[in-house]
Amino acid sequence: MVHGVKPLRVMRVVARMNVGGPALQSVMLMRGLPPDRFEQRLYTGFVEPDEADYVDLRAPGLAVHRVPSLGRRIRPTDDMRALAALTAEMRRFRPHIVHTHTFKAGTLGRIAAITARVPGRVHTFHGHLLKGYFPPRTVRLISAAESMLARHTDQLIAVGNRVRDDLLAAGIGRPGQYTVVPPGTSLGPLPDSRVAREELGLPAGGAVVAYVGRLTRIKRPDRLAAVAREVIAAVPDAIFAICGDGELAGELSSAARDLGGSVRLLGWRADVEKVYAAADLTLLTSDNEGMPVSLIEAGLAGVPVVATNVGSVSEVVKDGSTGLLTRCDANDLARSVIRLLRDDKLRHQMGRAAASWSRGQFGPERLVADVQRIYEAIAVDRGWWSYLPATESTVHASDVREVAR
């Protein structure tokens, strides 16, 4: 305990810890926030059969409290059980702050916090469900629910300016409630490109286009397959390395069969730095995004990006400098990929710029420090702390970096 300051109890709620931004950020905060100031607990459900568990894959040993009925799917009976379980846990743990991540956990977690009279409530929008997920009527219901919950939340965190602006335009929260906290991450040491390709079973020569992420409808694996077909027709030695899985993985499996091995399905991997080390560029084909961690990782690895200009992607990728952004169109994406694969000088220049930009903007220490400031401000505002203790050396940088290794 810092002299004169009692640690804040923080209960973190995530619906499931599948590989992706919410899980990564949650783990970084669990490991990065100083334990002499914050006593944290992480509550989560289980991943789906076609998903990889981030804790098992990249953060073994992290203490996790499992809530069996808390997960991805919306099932009224299970959701009521999860709500009751979360409320009971809050009454036992008596957190000062409940911090929720993603829509379902944000809904159940904040209702439980209101019921259990938890005084401090924080919610992070890692993206939003306002476009590309549901029909208009469902979107209106989601917006109404989020607007109501925002009125009972101390701080709303958005991963990017565009995400925040979209939420405000939908009537969710007030400008003063929001803080923009971009993701923060790091990569393990990058192996030599030839070594990485050999270990991944990729050819030593030719171009490699990487895709890292879930294979779900919003990510448009059909568009990814269409881009692959067009690029391979123009650059016959190109290989598409797909790191991930999901309910639409079959669309890429079909493309892999049709293209005779030019599409390689790698599944989920703990050593994702090998995928970036092997790649000449990274591709993203989504209809909607928050601020994709995979593109931040690509930047840290010095790999340029071709991506659809959706969500806060433009806050990660500087169009024309660290990569190329396009409309949500397979032909536009393919043309940009072909352009970079044929222009080694431009591609290498963008890779160097991406590394410099990403290391300065998206480091893990910055993420932890940003969230720490939010918690500490709530503590002072609520009267739990009478002053802000000195902040020097409170972020455990080595611990935070270890998360991504």
Image: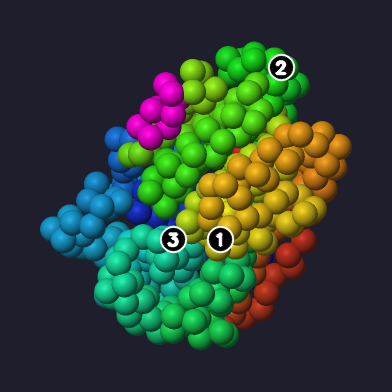
| Labels 2 and 1: the sequence-earlier one | 2
Disc 2 element:
loop
Whether residues under marks 2 and 1 lie with C-beta atoms below 8 angstroms apart, the answer is no
Dot 3 or dot 1, earlier in sequence: 3
Q: Which mark is residue 310?
A: 1
Above or below, comparing residue 312 to residue 397 in the picture: below
What amino acid is labelled 1 in the image? Val
Residue 249 placed where, x, y %?
Answer: 38, 34
Tell me which residue sits at (51%, 25%) in the image.
263
Label placed on residue 205: 2
User: Does the image show residue 401?
Assistant: no
* Residue stretch rendered in magenta on the structure: 250-258
Tell me how far mark 2 sits from mark 3, CA to CA. 42 Å
**Image location of residue 184, percent across then percent down:** 64, 53
Q: Are marks 3 and 1 in contact (CB under 8 Å)?
A: no
Identify residue type, mark 3: His
Q: Which residue is mark 3?
A: 101
